[in-house]
Image (cartoon, rainbow, N blue to C red):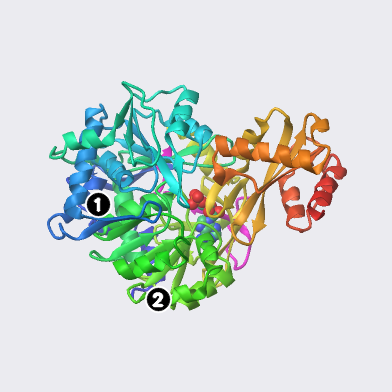
C-alpha cells in the first residue's frame, strides 16, 4: 500500500507529473501538450492540446478485449424489464442514436437536453452526444415544467430527447405534457423533440417538431458514426444545480479532464476493475448518475446497472438480489435510501449471496452513525462515506481505498482526496484554520483538479463571483459547506453556509421554492427553511404570509390553501421540492434591514436556540412560528 499522505502530497506538489500518469488510464487520439494550464486563474485547462472522446473511452475501446461482456444492465421493476447490453450491443445502439441526432441536425457543440426516465435509451442518448461532441444537459425526470423551462432557456438545446412517461411505484408519470408546457414557457424553442415511446401513456405529437425514436432507430440500424475527436477542454455536458440565487447554474464539465478524473477515481477510490459490475442506485439526472452510472464504470470496462424502480418494490431485498445476480463488486447509494431500507425486514439483508460486494459507497448528504452502523453490520462490508458536489463531479473527501488502508471513522467522509488542496477558512477573515477541530468553510485552493466544473455555462463572471470570491482576501473555491478537521486529517461536514437544503440527498435552493410559492395569488411573502428529518436528512418547511386572511380562518381552510400551495410547487418544480408543511403566519421574522432570518426560523423549528436576535425587527414574528410548531 502506498503511503497516502505522500500520494496526496505528490498530487499537489508534483501536480503535472502526477496527472500525466493518471492520463494514461484513458485513450488519447493526440496526447496532451500541457497537463494543466492555469495561466488564467481560476479557469483551469486540463490536458490542453490533447484530443480524446468520452464515448470512445466508455464504449469503443472495450470492443477489442471485451465485446461480449455486459456493459449496460437495464433493470426496471416498474415495467418488469431486464436487458443486458454487451459492449458490442451498446456500441451499436449508441451509433444509432448518434445517427438520429445527426439526422436532426445536431453538430459538435450543439446542446441536447435529455429529460428521461431511467431507461437504457437515456444512456444511449448521453453517450451518443459525447460521441459526436454535442453537449448534453440531463434534467432530472422528477422536475416539473417550471424547472425544465428554465433549463431549456439557459441551455438552448437544438434537440430535446424525452419519453412518453416514467413510472413510479407502478404508476405511469407522463413526461410529454410537462415537456410541452416547459417548451411553451421557454423563449427558446428546440428544432426537434425525439421521443421514446414506452407504450405507457398516449402522446400527442407536434408535426414537424416531434419524432419517434423507434422508426428513426430502425432506419439507422447499421449507420456507422465514428467518434469525433475532441479537444480535452471541449465541454462534454452541463448539469444544473441549485445555489443561493433562484436561478439554477449550469455546471459545465470538460472532456479530457473528466475522463481522466473518473478513470483515476475508479482505480484509487472505488477499486473497480474491468469485467466487474458497478451498481449506483442514483438517477441519471444527478451528478452521481453521470459519473458513476454512465461514464465512470464504463470507462473502467465495468458493467453498470441502470435501475428504474423503488428500493422497496417488490420488496426491500430488490437491490441485494441484483448484487447477487450480477455479482456487483462496487455499490454506490445515498444515506436516505439506506434509512428507507432500514425500516424493512432485516432478514432481507441476509437472504442473498453478497460475497461479490467489496464495499458500499454512500454520498450526497451526511451519513448518520446509526445508519452507517446498521448497514455495515448487516452487509459485513466496508461502508465508505464520501463527500463531493455536482460541481466537482467526483469525491473531494473520501478514504481512497486503492491507495490508503486507513480506517474509516463514523461521521466523517474521510480525508482530502488526491488532487484536492482542501483548506478550512475563517469565513470573516479568510485566514486558514490550521489547528485541529476548528470550524471553518471548506474551501479548495485552485486549480481544481481534473473533472471539476470548468465554468458556469455561458457565464464566466458568475463562475468567479459565485465560487471564487466569497471568502474575504483570497481567490479560493468555496464549497459552501462548514467543516472541521481532526488531528488525523479526517473532515466532518457540518452543513451548508448558504440557503441550500438537502432533501433525501437532493440539493434544493430555498429561494427557488420561495419563488414558486410566491406565485400563488394569495401568498404575499414566504420563507422556506430546511428542517432536520429522521428519514430524509432534511425536509423543506414553508412559512407564508397570506394576502387575504379571511381565506384562512380555520383548520379546513388552512389545509385547503396548504394543499393548493403544494400543488403549485409540484407543477412548477416537481414533487422533490414540495415542502413537508406550509404554515401560515401574519408576519415573517426579519432584520431591521429587511433580510429574512431563515437561520432563526430553522433553529426554532429544530428546537434549538436561535442565537443573537438583536437585529430582529419584530420578535413576535418568531414567537408565532414557535407557537405554530409546538401546537
Ligand atoms: P450535490 O451537488 O447535489 O451533490 O450536493 C452537494 C452537497 O451535498 C454538498 O455541498 C454537501 O452539503 C452535501 N453532501 C454531499 N455529500 C456529503 C457527505 N458525504 N456528507 C455530508 N454532506 C454531503
Q: What element carries label 1?
A: helix
Q: Which of 299 and 324 is in front in this view?
A: 324
Residue underneath mark 2: 405
Specify whether 42 is left or right of 469.
left
Q: Magenta residues? A: 428-457
Closest to the observer, 189 or 431? 189
As for residue 444 lying within the magenta part, the answer is yes
Residue 393 image offset from top left, x and y in percent: 41, 51
- Is the residue at mark 1 in contact range of ligand 1, meaning its CB lies under 8 Å from it? no
**Crowd tier of the residue under label 2, counting other residues whose Cα lies within 10 Å: few below 14, some 14–19, many 20 or above:** few
Question: Could you classify mark 1 by the number of other residues whose Cα lies within 10 Å: few (under 14), some (14-19), or many (20 or more)?
Answer: many
Q: Give the percent coordinates (x, y) of residue 201.
A: 40, 38
Mark 2 sits near ligand 1, with its Cβ under 8 Å away: no
Secondary structure mostly seen in the magenta stretch = loop
Residue 325 in view: yes
Residue at image point 47% right, 34% down: 148
Q: Earlier in the sequence, mark 2 or mark 1?
A: 1
Choose top left, top right, bottom left or bottom right for residue 51: top left
2 vs 1, front mark = 1
Give the secondary structure at mark 2: loop
Give the quadrant of residue 193. top left
Q: Position of residue 232 (x, y in %)?
A: 27, 43
> On the rendered image, what quadrant is the N terminus found in?
bottom left
Seen in the image, is 367 located left or right of residue 297? right
Residue in the image at 72% along x and 37% along y: 561
Residue 371 shown left or right of residue 49 in the figure: right
Image mark for residue 494: none
- Disc 1 target residue: 58
Q: At 20% across and 52% down in the image, what residue appears?
A: 27
Quarter holding residue 434: bottom right
- As measured in the structure, the alpha-carbon distance from the residue carrying label 2 to the one carrying label 1 is 29 Å
Foreground pick, 59 / 24: 59
Amino acid at each position: 500500500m502506498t503511503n497516502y499522505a505522500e500520494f496526496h502530497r505528490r498530487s499537489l506538489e508534483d501536480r503535472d507529473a502526477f496527472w500525466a500518469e493518471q492520463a494514461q488510464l484513458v485513450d488519447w487520439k493526440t496526447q496532451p501538450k500541457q497537463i494543466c494550464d492555469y495561466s488564467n486563474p481560476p479557469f483551469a485547462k486540463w490536458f490542453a492540446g490533447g484530443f480524446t472522446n468520452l464515448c470512445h473511452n466508455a464504449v469503443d475501446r472495450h470492443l477489442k478485449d471485451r465485446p461480449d461482456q455486459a456493459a449496460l444492465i437495464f433493470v426496471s421493476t416498474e415495467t418488469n424489464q431486464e436487458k443486458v447490453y454487451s459492449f458490442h450491443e451498446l456500441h451499436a445502439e449508441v451509433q444509432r442514436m448518434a445517427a438520429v441526432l445527426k439526422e436532426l441536425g445536431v453538430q459538435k457543440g450543439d446542446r441536447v437536453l435529455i429529460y428521461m426516465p431511467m431507461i437504457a435509451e437515456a444512456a444511449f442518448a448521453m453517450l451518443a452526444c459525447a460521441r459526436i461532441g454535442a453537449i448534453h444537459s440531463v434534467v432530472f425526470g422528477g422536475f416539473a415544467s417550471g424547472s425544465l423551462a428554465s433549463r431549456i432557456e439557459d441551455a438552448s438545446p437544438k434537440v430535446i430527447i424525452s419519453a412518453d412517461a416514467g413510472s413510479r411505484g407502478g404508476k405511469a408519470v407522463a413526461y410529454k405534457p410537462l415537456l410541452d408546457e416547459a417548451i411553451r414557457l421557454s423563449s427558446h424553442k428546440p428544432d426537434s423533440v425525439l421521443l421514446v415511446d414506452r407504450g405507457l401513456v398516449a402522446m400527442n405529437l407536434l408535426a414537424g417538431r416531434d419524432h419517434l425514436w423507434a422508426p428513426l432507430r430502425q432506419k439507422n440500424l447499421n449507420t456507422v458514426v465514428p467518434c469525433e475527436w475532441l479537444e480535452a477542454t471541449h465541454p462534454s455536458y452541463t448539469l444544473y444545480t441549485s445555489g443561493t440565487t433562484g436561478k439554477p447554474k449550469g455546471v459545465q464539465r470538460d472532456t479530457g479532464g473528466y475522463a481522466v478524473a473518473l478513470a483515476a477515481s475508479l482505480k484509487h477510490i472505488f477499486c473497480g476493475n474491468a469485467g466487474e459490475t458497478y451498481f449506483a442506485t442514483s438517477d441519471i439526472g444527478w451528478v452521481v448518475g453521470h459519473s458513476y452510472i454512465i461514464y465512470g464504470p464504463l470507462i473502467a470496462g465495468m458493467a453498470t446497472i441502470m435501475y428504474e424502480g423503488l428500493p422497496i418494490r417488490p420488496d426491500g431485498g430488490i437491490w441485494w438480489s441484483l448484487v447477487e445476480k450480477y455479482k456487483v463488486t462496487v455499490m454506490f447509494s445515498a444515506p436516505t435510501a439506506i434509512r428507507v431500507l432500514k425500516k424493512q425486514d432485516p432478514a432481507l439483508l441476509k437472504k442473498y449471496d453478497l460475497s461479490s460486494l467489496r464495499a458500499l459507497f454512500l454520498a450526497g448528504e451526511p451519513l448518520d452513525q446509526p445508519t452507517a452502523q446498521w448497514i455495515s453490520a448487516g452487509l459485513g462490508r466496508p461502508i465508505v462515506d464520501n463527500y463531493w458536489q455536482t460541481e466537482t463531479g467526483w469525491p473531494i473527501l473520501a478514504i481512497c481505498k486503492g491507495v490508503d488502508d486507513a480506517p474509516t471513522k463514523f461521521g466523517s467522509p474521510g480525508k482530502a482526496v488526491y488532487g484536492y488542496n482542501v483548506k478550512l477558512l475563517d469565513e470573516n477573515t479568510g485566514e486558514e484554520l490550521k489547528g485541529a477541530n476548528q470550524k471553518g468553510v471548506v474551501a479548495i485552493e485552485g486549480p481544481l483538479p481534473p473533472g471539476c466544473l470548468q465554468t458556469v455555462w455561458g457565464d464566466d463572471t458568475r463562475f468567479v463571483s459565485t465560487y471564487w470570491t466569497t471568502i474575504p482576501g483570497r481567490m479560493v473555491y468555496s464549497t459552501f459547506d462548514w467543516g472541521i478537521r481532526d488531528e488525523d486529517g479526517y473532515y466532518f461536514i457540518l452543513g451548508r453556509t448558504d440557503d441550500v437544503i438537502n432533501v433525501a440527498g437532493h440539493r434544493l435552493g430555498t429561494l427557488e421554492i420561495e419563488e414558486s410559492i410566491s406565485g400563488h395569488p394569495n401568498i404575499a411573502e414566504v420563507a422556506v427553511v430546511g428542517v432536520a428529518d429522521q428519514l430524509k436528512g432534511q425536509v423543506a418547511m414553508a412559512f407564508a404570509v397570506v394576502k387575504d386572511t379571511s381565506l384562512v380562518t380555520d383548520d379546513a381552510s388552512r389545509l385547503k390553501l396548504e394543499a393548493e400551495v403544494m400543488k403549485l410547487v409540484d407543477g412548477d418544480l416537481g414533487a422533490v421540492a414540495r415542502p413537508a408543511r406550509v404554515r401560515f403566519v401574519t408576519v415573517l421574522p426579519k432584520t431591521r434591514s429587511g433580510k429574512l432570518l431563515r437561520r432563526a426560523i430553522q433553529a426554532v423549528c429544530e428546537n434549538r436556540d436561535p442565537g443573537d436576535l438583536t437585529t430582529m425587527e419584530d420578535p413576535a414574528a418568531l414567537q408565532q412560528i414557535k407557537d405554530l410548531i409546538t401546537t
